[in-house]
Amino acid sequence: MDEKLQKVLARAGQGSRREMENRIREGRVLVNGEVATLGDRVSLTDSITIDGYAIVATEAGENRRVIIYNKPEGEVCTRKDPESRPTVFDKLPKLRGERWIAVGRLDINTSGLLLFTTDGELANRLMHPSTEIDREYLVRVMGEVTEENIATLKKGVTLEDGFARFTDIVDGGGEGINRWFYVCVMEGRNREVRRLWESQGVKVNRLKRVRFGPIFLPSKAKVGRWVEMEDSEVSSLCNMVDLKVAESKPKTQQQKIESQASQK
């Protein structure tokens, strides 16, 4: 392997390539004990640190793992929370020399499907708006919802951060002032689903993500538990975002034990 430094750092989950370029410019990255410069190329044998933290360089696609986590309400999507609230990272399997990267976020009051991967490049591509991956949510709203409201939400409204709309809305039933809907959006903007409904004068009181692109929340992923995707599923995900597919490697015994324990 002989690749640009910022590409290797991004794949290791340290941030986007642009963010890594900025850190290199700021002198925060060392290669073999020397301050790195933009344009440097590195190999697997090089020693790389960022802010004093050792980075494990890997080949593209090597050790690429993806897990599906069923997030409960009450967990935040940060690694460490200043208020000491539980985070989604607390229950994930431990890694050596790598770290789990969340593919987007869910707010503290939203539950459901959240993807994690060890491949920063895969995470960045899945999150990038240009990939146009839809997200489906099951939502319970309180208030009267008319056909006019639904038509408006599908046509689109202007929120404080720009135009937004549901690409699809399906009635999920319900009685009285509480009704369920399945809705789809093409982005992962902050509280987008809630804000869209609020624009029509109704309040969201339950929100759960049930699908991300072709990936559905599996029934075996209980609340607060994770399920690891099979190599064939990860390959399909990579093909969807035009990412090189590496040769699959058998899971280690430790990975098998962790996967079985998570589903109990």
Image: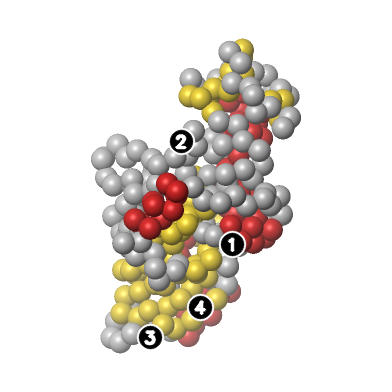
Q: Where is mark 2, residue-wise?
A: 96
Q: Nearer the viewer, mark 4 or mark 2?
A: 2
Q: Determine crowd level at label 2: few under 14, some 14-19, many 20+ residues with C-alpha closer than 10 A.
A: few
Q: Residue at x 47, y 57 (%)?
A: 228
Q: CA distance from mark 3 to mark 2?
A: 46 Å
Q: Is residue 10 left or right of residue 84?
A: right
Give the residue pinned by disc 1.
233
Q: Are marks 3 and 4 in contact (CB under 8 Å)?
A: no
Sequence-earlier tag: 3 or 2:
2
Residue at horizontal 53 percent and vertical 44 percent from the top: 118
How far separated are the C-alphas under marks 1 and 4? 27 Å
Query: Which callout, 1 or 4, points at the residue further toward the start of the chain?
Result: 4
Q: Residue 238: x percent and y percent?
A: 65, 55
Q: Amino acid at mark 1?
A: Glu
Foreground mark, 3 or 1, reads 1
Q: Nearer the viewer, mark 1 or mark 4?
A: 1
Number of residues whose C-alpha sits closer than 10 Å to that of mark 4, classed few (under 14), some (14–19) or many (20 or more) = some
Disc ID at residue 173: 3
As helix, strand or loop, the secondary structure at mark 4 comes to: strand
Percent coordinates x, y for residue 201 in the rendering:
38, 71
Q: Is residue 220 in view?
A: yes
Quadrant of the drawing holding the N terminus: top right
Disc 1 vs disc 4: Cβ atoms closer than 8 Å? Answer: no
Q: Secondary structure at mark 1?
A: helix
Q: Which residue is painted at 48% across and 81% down in the image?
A: 170
Find out whether the residues at labels 1 and 2 contact each other: C-beta distance under 8 Å.
no
The answer to which of 23 and 204 lies nearer the viewer is: 23
Q: Nearer the N terminus, badge 3 or badge 1?
A: 3
Which tag, 1 or 2, sits closer to the chain's start?
2
